[in-house]
Amino acid sequence: EDQEAELALRVKHFEQELGSNDSATALENQLASLSGHLETLKEQIEAFETIRAQRKQVAEERVLVQTETQQLVQTKEEYQGTLEAARSKHASNVALLEQAKARQAAVEAERIANDKVHAEQILPGQVEKNALMEEKQELAKTMNKLHEESLSNDKENNKGLATQSETLN
């Protein structure tokens, strides 16, 4: 019974603290409302954390994009430098080619002029030399004929002498 009395006293004490049933219902309504607010806050915190994670990811991607952009700009500048060097070398090669063509044309003109001079100076001498060579060949033929005739005459003379010698003997 002491315990029951003590429990009853406690219940009475709680009822006084809580007030009437109306205040208990109001507290329950407030508690339900606070629970709803708590759930809303939890959802907002989750959304905030999601946004924070997305922002962090975006910031990391931005750094990557900036790094890649800097590398691309540097590569572009290197290629432009290489391109300018190649264009300069090409222009130099074109100039050298033009010089070589001019030299080749000058050498060809000089060769043609030398051929003309050669033809004017040497060709008449060559014609004369060729005529003399033909004349020399003709003389050689004539001398061969004469030599053959001489040999033939010597044979006939030798035969005639041999015949005379036999007759004398």
Image (spheres, rainbow, N blue to C red):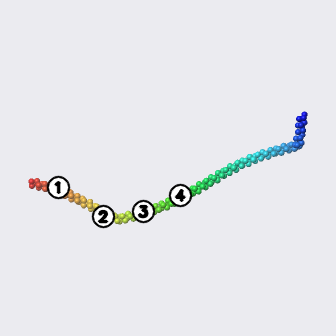
Circles 3 and 1, Cβ within 8 Å, touching? The answer is no
Q: Name the residue under label 4.
A: 86
Residue designated by label 3: 107
Amino acid carrying label 3: it is Val
Task: Give the CA separation, mark 4 to mark 1.
Answer: 92 Å
Circle 2 residue: 128
| SS state under label 2 | helix
* Residue 155, disc: 1
Say which of 107 and 156 sits in front. 107
Left or right? Give the position of 90 relative to 114.
right
Instruction: Mark 2 vs mark 3: give the one in front.
Output: 3
Residue at far front of view: 2
Q: How far apart are marks 4 and 2 (CA)?
A: 61 Å
Binning the other alpha carbons within 10 Å of mark 2 as few (below 14), some (14 to 19) or many (20 upward) gives: few
Q: Where is residue 48 in the image (x, y as percent from the top left)?
A: 73, 48
Q: Which of marks 4 and 2 is in front?
A: 4
| Relative image position of residue 86 (x, y in whole percent) | 53, 57
Between disc 4 and disc 1, whose residue precedes? 4
Looking at the figure, which quarter contains the N terminus?
top right
Q: Is residue 54 left or right of residue 129?
A: right
C-alpha gap between disc 1 and disc 2: 40 Å
Q: Residue at x 40, y 63 (%)?
A: 111
